[in-house]
Amino acid sequence: MATLSHFDESGASRMVDVGGKAETNRTARASALVRMQPATLTLIRDKQLAKGDVLEVARLAGIMAAKKTSELIPLCHPLALTSVKLDFTFPSEDSLRIEATVAVFARTGVEMESLTAVSVAALTVYDMCKSADRAMTIEAVRLEEKAGGQSGHFVREPVSK
């Protein structure tokens, strides 16, 4: 099992020194699921909520959040992201799937940026729809794939049904 790199030998928190690492292209893809009443999903799809186009606001929130990850997560490095993309799908009549893909040319990866993007996008969906459905849930926030860097390529195994 790998050691926890954000702690020194005495157990004190530290930002990992990435100065000796090579800059490479790195990407990460994360997802989240928002469950809601089917009627709420219809309002989102049909752009019928009074607050506006929920998915476009959530997309902007996710992009902005990815860019601010180092301000939110204490030991994350600030990164000059080269791309942030959010996509939305409707896997069932009561769920919205959010996926973020983030890219950078840097010495460290963008897993946290992709996870932050989907988390904030999901929270934005909740915020915009809570007047219609306070019982919504945000589920399965997870890393789907990452590429680049020393640890290589990771792809989550598909969930068997």
Image (tube, grey):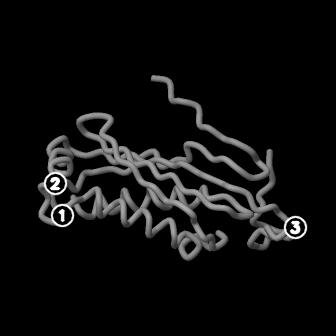
Q: Earlier in the sequence, mark 3 or mark 1?
A: 3
Quick check: marks 3 and 2 in contact, CB under 8 Å? no
Any mark on residue 52, and which?
1
Question: For the residue carrying disc 3, how many other residues have a C-alpha within 10 Å: few (<14), some (14-19), or many (20+)?
Answer: few
Question: Which residue is nearer to you in this view: 150 or 137?
Answer: 150
Secondary structure under badge 1? loop
Q: Quadrant of residue 78?
A: bottom right
Report which residue position mark 3 lands on. 9
Q: Please name which of the two marks, 3 or 2, marks the residue nearer to the observer.
A: 2
Disc 3 versus disc 1: distance between alpha carbons? 51 Å
Judge from the rendering whether residue 101 lies leftward or rightward of residue 76; answer left or right. Answer: left
Question: Which residue is nearer to you in this view: 161 or 61?
Answer: 61
Secondary structure under badge 3? loop
**Image: 76 above or below 3:** below
Q: Amino acid at mark 3?
A: Glu
Q: Position of residue 27 (x, y in %)?
A: 61, 52
Quick check: marks 1 and 2 in contact, CB under 8 Å? yes
Report which residue position mark 2 lands on. 47
Question: For the residue carrying disc 2, how many other residues have a C-alpha within 10 Å: few (<14), some (14-19), or many (20+)?
Answer: some
Q: Earlier in the sequence, mark 1 or mark 2?
A: 2
Question: Which residue is nearer to you in this view: 95 or 80?
Answer: 80
Judge from the rendering whether residue 86 lies leftward or rightward of residue 42; answer left or right. Answer: right
Q: Position of residue 128 (x, y in %)?
A: 24, 63
Quick check: marks 3 and 1 in contact, CB under 8 Å? no
Secondary structure under badge 2? loop
Question: For the residue carrying disc 1, how many other residues have a C-alpha within 10 Å: few (<14), some (14-19), or many (20+)?
Answer: few
Q: Amino acid at mark 2?
A: Lys
**Image: 90 above or below 44:** above
